Image (cartoon, rainbow, N blue to C red):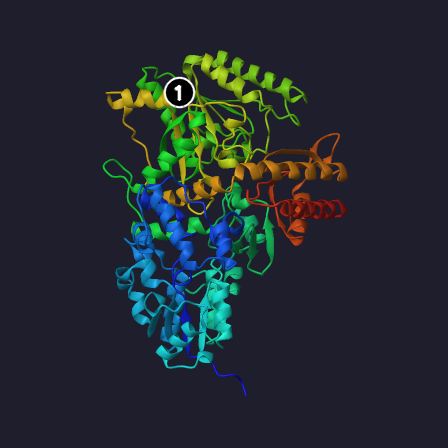
Amino acid sequence: MSEAKPKALVLDFGGVVTRTLFETHALTERALGLKPGTLNWRGPFDPASDALWRSMQADEISERDYWKTRTREVGRLIGEDWQDMSTFVQRARGAEPQAVIRPEAERAIRIAHQAGVRLAILSNELDLFYGKSFRERLPLLALFDAIVDATYTKVLKPDRHAYAIVGEALELPLAACVFVDDQRRNVDGAIAAGMPTVHFDVARPAQSYAEALGHFGLTLLIGKPESLPMRDINFLTENNAKPIWHPMAHPAEMRATPPKIIMKGEGVSVTDAEGRTVLDAVGGLWNVNLGYSCDPIKQAMAAQLDALPYYSGFRGTSTGPSIELAYELTEWFAPEGMVRAFFTSGGSDSVETALRLARQYWKIRGQGDRTKFLALKKGYHGTHFGGASVNGNANFRRNYEPLLPGVFHTPAPWTYRNPFDETDPAKLAKLCARAIEEEIAFQGADTIAAFIMEPVLGAGGVIVPHESFMPMVRAICHRHDILLIADEVVTGFGRTGAWAGSRLSGVKPDFMTIAKAITSGYFPLGATLIGAKVADVFEADKTSFGAIGHGYTYSGHPVGCAAGLAALAETKRLALNENAAARGVELGKALEALKAKHQLVGDVRYQGLMAALELVSDRAAKKPADKKTMAAVADAAYGAGVMLRVSGNTVILSPPLVISATDVAKIAEGLDVGLAAAAAA
C-alpha cells in the first residue's frame, strides 16, 4: 500500500515566506539613506564573511540573538539606538510588506490552498521581528489555518514542543504535516518530531517550493506564473526563427539553420531547449558580468515593480531610483571626471546621445562649424545612424549607406593587421596617433566636434591598444580643442580589470558612454556621462541652444535604475574588477598555449576578461578562416560544454566576471576541442 499524502504545509516565515534581510540590502540601504554596499553581512549567502552567522550555526548564539545584534548595528549606522527587531524591519521594509514576499511563496501557497492543503506558519519571531501591523497588512496570511508564533508561545524551534503546538493547532498528527524551514537545525528538530521536511534553500526558492508541493502531488512550474503557460518545446522548435528576425543575422540563414533556444540561466551557465547546459563564455553579450543568479538585482527589480513600475523622466518629473543611480554613477566614474548622467535604453542610445550633445556643445559656444567626427577603423559604436556612421567596420555600414556625412576614420593600433606593417605596440601607437593628427590637419580642427574611441576595441576583434595610445589621443584632442568620447559600453564596470577602460591609462574624457554591465543585462539601460567642461557650458547657457531636445521614453526607467543600483552594489562588493584581472591572466595564458598548439590560431588578444582568437587558414598569409571552419569550432566547443561567439574569423570571449579558475580551464578545454575538430574536418 502506498504511503498516504500529507494534509498540511507548515512554513517558517522569515526567509521562507519573505525574502531574507540578506537579500534586500539594497532596499534597506535606500530606505535608510545608506550608501550602496554599506551592509555587507550576507549570512547563508556568504558564511565565510559573516562570523556572527557562523556562531549561530554552531549553536553558540540563537537566531534571535543574531538579529538583535544586527538590529543594533544598523541602528547605529543612522545614529539611532535600536533594541527591537521590529524597528529594523519596519524601518527597512515596513512601508510595503507585500514587496518582500517571495513571489514563489505566494504562488505555492495559493496552489496548496486551492488544492485543499491546510496551511500553517511556525515562526520563532513573527510579531517580535515584524510587528503586529506587518502581518495585518498581508492578505496572503488570511489563507492560513494556523499561525504559531514563539513571540507568544515562548517555545522556540528546534524544541520538539514547538512542533507539537502546530500539530495541535491543525488537529493533525505531525506525520501528516510537511515542514519547511531555511535553518538546518530547525529542520532536524522537525525530523526528530516525526515530520516530513524540506530544507529551504534561500538561493533557490522556486526549487524548494516545488519540492514542498511535490509531497502533495502538486506542481510549481519554475520560472513563470502558472497563469501564463509556456508553449511546449515542440512549438518553440517548430517556430524558431520564423516569426522573429534576429539582430546581426541573415533571416534566410536563420530559417535554414535555426539558432539555439536558450531557456534558463544559472550561475555562469545557460541551458537550451534540449536540456544541455553549457558555460556561457559570451556573458550574454559582454553584459552579464554578475552571472545569471544575482538575487539582489532580481529582488530590487521586483520591489521597484511593485512600488512604481514606470514613470517618465522628461521635463517636469523624476524618480527616486534615477536620482540615486545618477549620483552613484558620477561617484563611480569621478576619477574620469564625470559629473552628470543622461539615461538611455542601451549602448547605441548612449553613443547617439554623446554625438548629439557634442554637436550641441559647439553650437552653445558659437562654433557651429564643428560638426565632424573622427573615429577608429574597426571601432564599434552601436547601430543607430550616428553610431553606424562612426563605426569603423564595413559589416555594420555598407547595407545602410549613405550614412552621416562628415565622419572620418583613422587606423586602429592593431598589431596583427595595420597599414604600417608595424608589430611593435608602442611604435604602432605613435604611428596611429600621427595619422589622427594628419586627419585633423586635413579636415581643419575648427570643423571637428569630437573623436570617439573604445579604450579596448570590442566587437572589432578585441584590439588592445598600447597603454600610451589613449593618453596620446587625449593630448591631441586637448591641443586642438576637440571633445573626446570614450565608448565604455563594453569596458565599463570591470571587464578590463579596471572599473573603466579609460582608467587603465588615467585618461579623463569629455563624455563616457555606458550600458550592458550597468544592470548586468537584467534590464535594458544605458547612460551618457558628461564631464565638467561640457556640463559647465550647458548649465551656464541662457539661450535656447542649451535646451536638450533629445531623450527616450525609457530614459531613467525606475525599474532599470533599481536594477542598476543593485548591480553596482554587487559589482563593488564582489570586486569584479579584481577577479576579471586575475582570471584574465589565466585566460591569456591558456589562449597563448592554444595558439602554440593549433596552427588555426593566427593571433590571440586579451585584456582582463575580454579576449579573442583570430583564426586563419594560412598563418604566413594571415588568410582568414572561412565560415565553415568557424562554425565547426563553435559547434564542437558547444558539444564540449562551452558557448562561444563567432564574429567573422574571430572567436570572441567575454564571460561573466564572476567566473572561477575552474571555469577558465573549462573554456580553454572547450576551445581546444573546437579547434581540434575544425582542423580534422
Q: Which residue is mark 1?
A: 371
Q: Determine whether, in the image, residue 530 is placed left or right of residue 53.
A: left
Image quadrant assignment for residue 535: top left
Q: Residue at x 58, y 61 (%)?
A: 274
Q: Front-most of 114 and 74? A: 74
Residue 415 horizontal/vertical position (percent): 65, 25
Q: Is residue 519 visible?
A: no
Q: Residue at x 46, y 61 (%)?
A: 205
Residue 562 horizontal/vertical position (percent): 37, 45
Q: Front-most of 390 and 301? A: 301
Looking at the image, the residue that sits furthest to the front is 60
Looking at the image, the residue that sits furthest to the bottom is 1
Q: Front-most of 135 and 508? A: 135
Q: Is residue 360 above or below residue 366?
A: below
Q: Is residue 130 above or below residue 309?
A: below
Residue 612 horizontal/vertical position (percent): 63, 37
Give the amino acid type for the residue marked by disc 1 in the picture.
Thr
